[in-house]
Amino acid sequence: MGYTNAASSDFWNIPLAELQTPEAFEGMFANEIRGIARDPSIPDYYTTDPQAEVLVFERIPPEHIFAICTESGQDSRQLRELLPSFSAIEIDVCPKFFKPRTDYQRWKKDQIDDITLDDEAPF
């Protein structure tokens, strides 16, 4: 679990086991991250930082995937063509999931300054 973008240097020296705890998950919803307070206007189920992410290190079986959201109808059609065996999975067009959140501006500069562009990942 990463309370911010996994490419952030914040995670370089944290053992992977520490990022795989319930506390790490809860940290994604902290009242403050990196000196930036949680925006009170965002829903409780939003992570505090818009770039927080859950990293998955194993294959997710298709039967555990209930729906896939795409940005456009074209994306949805292309995905359905590429994955015909996933006919039981609902593919929805959800453009709002691909737009910046209402609180994104408060994070924008901080995120750009800290993202590493190296080829080496910290894990």
Image: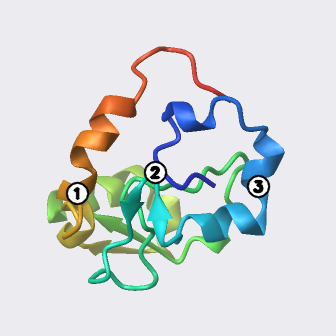
| Circle 3 residues within 10 Å: few <14, some 14–19, many ≥20 | some
Asked if 8 appears above or below 22 in the picture, the reply is: above
Q: Which element carries disc 2, helix, strand or loop? A: loop
Residue type for callout 2: Arg
For marks 3 and 2, the one nearer the N-term is 3
Give residue 7's mark: none
- Residue type (three-letter) at the residue carrying disc 3: Gln
Q: Seen in the image, is 116 located left or right of residue 107?
A: right
Closest to the camera, between mark 3 and mark 1, is 1
Pointers 1 and 2 in contact (C-beta within 8 Å):
no
Which secondary structure, mark 1? helix
Q: Residue furthest front?
A: 35
x and y, in percent, of residue 114 in the image: 39, 32
Name the spot of residue 3 as percent of width and height, x first.
53, 55
In the rendered image, which residue does mark 3 sit on?
Answer: 20
Instruction: Give the labeled residue for mark 1.
Output: 106
Q: Position of residue 13 (x, y in %)?
A: 70, 30
Relative to residue 33, is residue 7 depicted above or below?
Answer: above
**Tag 1: residue type?**
Arg
Residue located 40% across and 53% down the image: 51
Q: Residues within 10 Å of mark 1 (few under 14, many from 20)?
A: some
Q: What is the C-alpha distance between the residues marked 3 and 1?
A: 27 Å
Q: How far apart are labels 1 and 2 at the CA level?
A: 12 Å
Residue found at the far right of this picture:
17
Q: Quadrant of residue 91?
A: bottom left
Please state, as top left, top right, bottom left or bottom right, where the C terminus lies in the image: top right
Which residue is the site of mark 2?
34
The quadrant of the image that shows the N terminus is: bottom right
Q: Is residue 35 above or below residue 66?
A: above
Can the viewer see residue 71 in this picture? no
